[in-house]
Image (cartoon, rainbow, N blue to C red):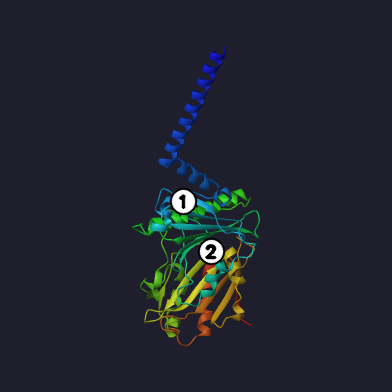
Amino acid sequence: MKIFTSRRQRRVGWSVGGILLTLYIVAQTLYSTGVYASWRDQRSLDSACDGTLAQGGLGDALNSSHVRARGADGSEYLAACLINRPDTGRHGGALQLMLRWSDQSATSEALAPFSRNANGLQGQAAPLGNGWPGYVRYDGSAQVVVALDCQNNKNRALVAYGDLIQWPDDAKTTEPVLTGLGRVTTETAQKAAAKYGCQAQGGRQLTHVSLPSPNGKTAPQQLAQAQGSCVALRGLAGQASDAGTPDFVDYPADAHTPQVNCYLYTPAGKPGYGLYAYYGAVAKDFESVNLANRNDDYTLATARCPQSDQEAVFALYHLYDRDTDSHPVRHYSAPFAKFALKAFAEHEAKQRDCTDVRMMSRS
């Protein structure tokens, strides 16, 4: 009996040893072939940003099919996550997504662009298009901002920020990267809105996103030919010329974007006046910046819009040129500024069924 028991023990030991060896070989194979790393990275993506991260455009945004995610420092946000490539250190490619409610205070980083409105083109942004209430800006790195108004709560919107904090150095062209960033940000915003109970209207899948013209590389045109975001000023060509800004640079007309820009240029090709329109959550953030402590020359207007309880805000700034340490338009014309802003604001309001356009006093 002892002989048979010993044989059975040996067989069990061999079987267990064989199973352990097989598991070891499988584990080594999964690890060495990258299958385990791929599984682990996919799990990190599925849970990123509280499970709301949209993955459709990630490969294009980071120019890689192998990406991973982790939580970001987002104590001031509803959710935040960092997505990068395993080879980010060698090739770049990293983006950060942050989500917040519009009735929560915006961070200083989110508000910073509004304080740069008077500095040349630093406040510029271009619409995303395809029906999305968002825009893309570029001030050294690309950022996409989307603000989805909650139809079941007109005091609230879900705001998403997509920051491309490291450009993928091996990307040959910029458009796929920007389009990927736009897709990730817009589609994540829509998933988050659904998850958190915000009934919101998004847009169609983005297929083309371009940066606003960096460093004023778009050639200014005569204001009498204005279209797009500057079309309201076409009839003011004479007054604008007398004010020192006969030319313009505009952006595509878009009744969904929460920020609209139009720039009036001097004959020397410098932006002299900048016009801005802000809607919904973005208007609220703009208003939270304390303009009273600034010495910039500007004028403001507001309007009431049906999409949100937040008033729309319109602004015209006398622009400063850091290259020459001066104002391209030497003397600020307050009468022209009010006349131009009124025309701009009334046209913008009409496009969105807004009413009660009012010029604001700075006192």
Please tell me whether mark 2 sits on a helix, a strand or a loop: loop
Q: Is residue 15 above or below residue 357?
A: above
At horizontal 43% and vertical 85% (from top left) the residue drawn is: 242
Query: Where does residue 194 sit, x and y in percent of width and height?
Result: 59, 49
Residue sitting nearer the eye, 41 or 217: 41
Give residue 250's position: percent from left, percent from top: 43, 70
Q: Residue at x 48, y 48 (%)?
A: 55
Q: Nearer the viewer, residue 174 or 314?
A: 174
Which amino acid type corresponds to the residue marked 2 in the rendered image? Pro
Query: In this figure, which residue is indicated by the disc labeled 2?
Result: 258
Q: Which residue is mark 1?
A: 205
Residue 275, position as x, y percentages in the image: 50, 74
Mark-to-mark CA distance, 1 and 2: 18 Å
Near mark 2 (Cα within 10 A), the count class, few <14, some 14-19 or many ≥20, is many
Classify the position of the N terminus by image quarter: top right
Q: Amino acid at mark 1?
A: Gln
| Residue 64 location (% of width, % of height) | 40, 51
